[in-house]
Image (tube, helix red, strand yellow):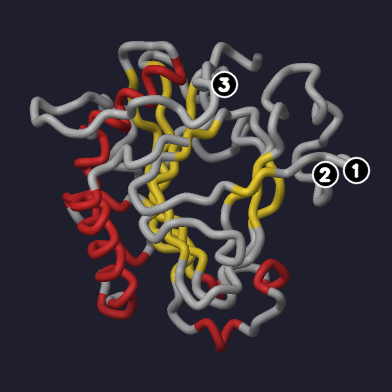
Amino acid sequence: MLRRAVPRALVDELAAAAGRIQRSVRRLPAPLRSRLVLERDLPPDRRDFVPAQAVGEAIFIIGDPVAFSTVFWRVLEQPGVVAALRQAIGAPALVAHFMNVTIKQARFGRAIGWHRDFPNRYACPASPRFARLMIPLDGMTGQGGATLALPGSHRAGGEAEPFAAGATSIPEGAVIRTIRCNPGDLVVIHPMLLHGGGMNRSAKPRRNLLLQAGEAGLPLLHRPSPEGVLGRRVAASPIRGPTPQSFVRRPLRIRGAR
């Protein structure tokens, strides 16, 4: 996790753009409406069986956000984002795979089961030389459904190696870390790291912008559509901006599955 890696002014613009989408679900044209995943259309078990009629037009995922607002394109140019990806993946040329805004609504925002991002069935490269970044637009707290992680689970032969993808419980006695952060912080997720998260039981929404990017030239086994950012270079613009000074703990290095 990197503190204050994304300028607060941009975070505020991204949050405002997401809010406009949230308020205009019924007025959106069909092509844009099809990019949304609504909470009411998902299984109710991960929102404590709150009935569909009670959640109304609440959005769980804003897919392909660049189709809604050009402000989301600016994420691919942020020096802090580019530096984090280059340091994590170890490749100078990077391309985006997909972007979304994942929303855990206040009071009933759904829990996300334990999983690894590699392999996945949406935008899966041929090897785990990629990373997912989260930019919290509202911050993350424990009560608000912050992301949980199992440290060391990305290492081959680590303590969580026997953990099966899709399982609903973790090894007994495992130490779980809660990723608490502020708007504009940057969370870098190794594709083999076990992570998940509980429901948002707070009075505030938890909106995270999610970006997956990887080494340029790495083929995708699954190519998502529509995704405006797919294949676009991730590169800092000439405009100067804040760059991450250091990782909170040790730098993340992605070299295959190790």
Report x, y in % for residue 28: 26, 72
Residue hosting label 1: 172
Circles 1 and 2, Cβ within 8 Å, touching? The answer is no
The local crowd at label 3, few if under 14, some if 14 to 19, many if 20 or more residues have their Cα within 10 Å, is: many
Left or right, 21 with respect to 35, comes to: left
Residue hosting label 3: 128
**Residue furthest out toward the right:** 172
Left or right, 118 with respect to 222, comes to: right
**Helix, strand or loop status at disc 2:** loop
The local crowd at label 2, few if under 14, some if 14 to 19, many if 20 or more residues have their Cα within 10 Å, is: some
Q: Which amino acid does label 1 sit on?
A: Glu
* Distance CA(mark 2)–CA(mark 3): 22 Å
Residue hosting label 2: 170
Q: Earlier in the sequence, mark 2 or mark 3?
A: 3
Point 30% across, 53% down: residue? 65
Report x, y in % for residue 44: 67, 73
Q: Which amino acid does label 3 sit on?
A: Pro
Q: How many labels does the image show?
A: 3
Point 41% across, 63% down: residue? 36
**Helix, strand or loop status at disc 1:** loop
> Split into 4 quadrants, where in the image is the C terminus?
top right
| Residue 222 in sight | no
Q: What residue type is labelled 2?
A: Ile
Q: Quadrant of residue 195?
A: top right
**Residue furthest out toward the bottom:** 53
The local crowd at label 1, few if under 14, some if 14 to 19, many if 20 or more residues have their Cα within 10 Å, is: few
| Residue 207 in sight | yes
Report x, y in % for residue 126: 55, 19
Report x, y in % for residue 55: 53, 82
Point 43% across, 53% down: residue? 208
* Distance CA(mark 1)–CA(mark 2): 6 Å
**Helix, strand or loop status at disc 3:** loop
